Image (tube, rainbow, N blue to C red):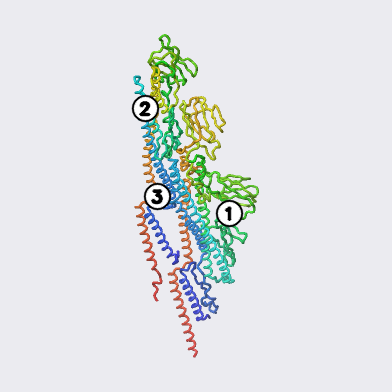
Amino acid sequence: MRISTTTFFNAGLTGILNQQSAMLKTQQQLSSGLAVATPSDNPIAAVQALDTQQNESLNTQYTTNRGTAEDQLGLVDTTLSSVGTLLQSASTIAVAAGNATLSNSDRASYATQLSGQLQQLLGLANTKNGEGQYLFSGYQGNTQPFAQTTAGANYAGDDGQRLIQVSPSQQIAVSESGADIFQKIRSGNGSFTTGASGTNTGQGVINAGSVTNPAALTGDNYQINFTVAGGVTTYDVLDTTKGTTVQSAQPFTSGNAISFDGMQMQISGAPANGDQFTVAPSTNQSVFTTLTNLINALNTPASTPATLASIQNQVTAGIQNLSQSLSNVLAANSAVGARQNQLTSLDTVGTSLDTQYQQQLSNLTSVNYAQAASTLNEQQLSLEAAQKSFAQVDGLSLFNYLTG
Amino acid sequence: MPDLLNIGISGLNATMTQLVTTGNNISNASTPGYSRQEVDLQPSTPQYTGTGFLGSGVEVDAVKRDYSTFLTTQVQQATAESSQSSTYYNQIQQLDNMLGSTTSGLAPALQNFFSGVQTVANDPSDVPSRQALISSAQSMISTFQGMSQQITAMGQGLNNQIAASVTNINSYAQQLAQLNQSIVSAQGADGNNPPNSLLDQRDQVVQQLNQEVQGTVVKQSDGSYNIYIGNGIPLVVGNLAYSLTTMTSPTDPGSAEVGYGPPGKQVVLGTNSITGGNLGGVLQFRNNSLIPAQNALGQIAIGVASTFNAQNSLGQDLNGNIGGNIFTIPAPVVGVNSNNTGTGVVNAAITNAGALTTSDYSLSYNGANYQLTRLSDNSVTTFAAFPQTVDGVTLTLASGVIKPGDTFLISPTENGASGLAMATTDVSKIAAAAPILGSAGFSNTGSATISAGTVNGPPPVNANLQQPVTITFTGAGTFSVTGVGTGNPVGVAYTSGNNISYNGWTVQISGTPAAGDTFTVSPNTNGSADSRNALLLAGLQTQNTLNNGSATYEGAYDQLTSSVGNQTDELQVTSQAQQSMLTQAQASQQSVSGVNLDEEAANLIRFQESYQACGKMVQIADTCFQSLITAAQ
């Protein structure tokens, strides 16, 4: 094929230009460290890199979120522990105050101690976190949850539980509502409460009782009515909800078990004729109410044996309710602990994910220095060869050989 | 008897012509478009003598150029194609670079925005966090606007390029018309003396024309070239040149189009008519890459803004009010064709951001039905009356009458990115809380619990959403509901964990309730620490909200990036391939028409020797004559 002079030069020149442009590209890769500088270099890798980046950014965000959650939960944990310790000490005082041989002033001094603890408990219940938000007010972070009343305390918050997104699929609660911790505590033994009527004249003291057969529970209200006739004490058990008599004219021995409808309780002491004891299903009672009732009971002077028995009945009920409150708080505290553990293990996963994403990103977009350097060498060689051959060929012309 | 002198002189003339032609070739060796010229020699008419025919010398028949129509046409076509793909490639590289940045692109802006939402969710009543969210929203908007402006600027650049190409094409057309005229008159009646340099010049102009747009040459019998572009649109006919114009698009005042025709009756030449060359590359880039990219960016912007607005409108803000819009969403662009004869005004509104596409739409009326054509795949929706909703856009006829033949160009997402704005910068308007809260009655004896509650979308919320509602259990398995708007049903069957929905909210009650237990759903007053809605707002980032539930915002952006990246990659390969084809075609053409200096050097020697020989012949003829004169004395 005939080659024109123009084609000759163009071919050589094009070779040199192409080599130069390839070398420039390799040089840019080496200096920027990126093999994928624009999406067109490797469209699939570019998109995967964008995805990996988003995942990494989300992962970092969740780590930050977990930090916030840990801080909040830490504060809740500490506060609940303090509440638990307080309730335990209150229980100890209540048990001591139940001693029948105490004088009025002894009981009154116990009442004072309990008063102090009531104030402390209110203070703990109204704890604020570092941002000035109340811990136990549900969603109403700016509202003080508890205000003392004559009967106990009023709850001004709501039932909300604050949540934080700690992983792509998990939200963790970082608060407990004051209602759940302090207000909604099952009274009595959790299934039923026992009590003595205020008009009793005898000295019977009823204990908290227990459930012997959960399947037989009816949830009804009962009355145990005592009749003392001719030195013989008997009692009837009436179901006041249904209006039926469950047991009648049972012989009474102090301290013996009284059982009916899956429940069992004991009355000790000597009830008088016409004394009544009540059994009712458990309801929710606030721990503040429990403490207030205890304080009021201990402040009452025991002028008669009947009054003493009444005080003792209330103290028994109080001790039972305090025990329920303590269990409630401990349960909540351990739930908080479990969540803190969850956060720790999520943190571990998050750290290893972060490393993984960094690695992935680097694999996708970073340049392989060894490879790029050797490619650059190759291209340099090719460029030199193209330039040299161009120079050599350039000088060849027939005109050089024509003389004359 | 032929005269030796005359034969010698004819030989001298002939070889001198050859030397001159060779000299011409050598001096024009690097002239673009030059075809190598050769002298055609013919022996002169021989004389008949008694002893037979005696040759009488040589005559120059013609000086012709070495030229192959086929190869030249090949080069012209290859030029048009190569020019188109390299122009397209150069343009799309700018787009590619803009989209792929991992530090300054859209991806980091979106991530920062949602980070801000998560921070608010962690502490909803914290004002600095809310302020930071507003700031990152504003920064996200600037990123959208910045990228959109870059694309618009590219579009402006394209308009200028179109104008420049059209000017060049018109100038080439003029030149070709004049050359046609010159060639026809210079060629003479018999066409035997081709005006070689004019012919070369004309081919060169055609080549330059093909750089701008593909022009097909049809050779006429009188030697002139007729040039047609596109599907047979005449540009040059004989010595008449038609011109193209740069006109504003009838449906889009911001775009320039190529126009053709007499003034007042201009027709737009679209991408079907203009192929090849710079002009073809520019038009293809605009239609196939630039407009879709602008629309895709807009789709993402509108998607983020409308889903965020919608979720915010289901929540409760810091002032205790139901949330409103945080972003202002720009409306679709409706371009009315300036040639419309009717008075119809069409309004378009976005009613479902999740169903939007990245395509533009063309609305036309044929007298009986309206047709909406989706320009990306040419699929048509036919309908008889307004309003009509297609792909998330609702079209209404606001006023006037549409006449048959009227067209409208509807671009739903074109201004999505550039027109996005904050509707409010008031930090308290971010609705982090939910408006309602479920609670269990204090004196409940059963063990059932109630969830906090969610608000049912889409907005606006039910008018009775915040009416207090009480659910009372009449037995362990049935409950009754009291509250405005619930209809106060009784005896509703209870299944633990099932959804219970009234007045636009949904709660779940789980566990075992006892008879007499109550649960209430009431307004979430003072719920400043409630982050339920903020968590849902943050969750939008990972939900498939776009493209009919198949892509997240980042996913849609990924699609745009990879589509442009792939196109760029393809174009790089294509333009390299076409460049090689052009080089080859040029080499083939040059092998016929190109000058090889070595060859000309050899020819110089040959013709020089011939000249010397002919000169010697003249000398000998003179010597013979001299001898004759001397002999006669």
Amino acid type at circle 1 is Thr
Please report, as a chain letter, where disc 3 is located: A
Given residues A265 and A316, the one toward you in this image is A316
Q: Quadrant of residue A89?
A: top left
Query: Where does residue B140 sit, x and y in percent of width and height?
Result: 46, 49
Q: Are the residues at dot 3 and dot 1 in contact (C-beta closer than 8 Å)? A: no
Please report, as a chain letter, where disc 1 is located: B
Given residues A248 and B95, the one toward you in this image is A248
Q: Does mark 2 fall on the same chain as mark 1?
A: no
Counting other residues with Cα less than 10 Å from the Cα at mark 2, is it few (<14), some (14-19), or many (20 or more)?
Answer: some
Amino acid type at circle 3 is Thr
- Residue placed farthest to the bottom in the image? B633
Q: Label 2: which residue?
A: A112
Give residue B251's mark: 1
Amino acid type at circle 2 is Thr
Q: Nearer the viewer, mark 2 or mark 3?
A: 2
Per the model, the C-alpha gap separating discs 1 and 2 is 88 Å
Counting other residues with Cα less than 10 Å from the Cα at mark 3, is it few (<14), some (14-19), or many (20 or more)?
Answer: many
Q: Is residue A334 visible?
A: no
Per the model, the C-alpha gap separating discs 2 and 3 is 73 Å
Q: Is residue A235 above or below residue A92?
A: above
Counting other residues with Cα less than 10 Å from the Cα at mark 1, is it few (<14), some (14-19), or many (20 or more)?
Answer: some
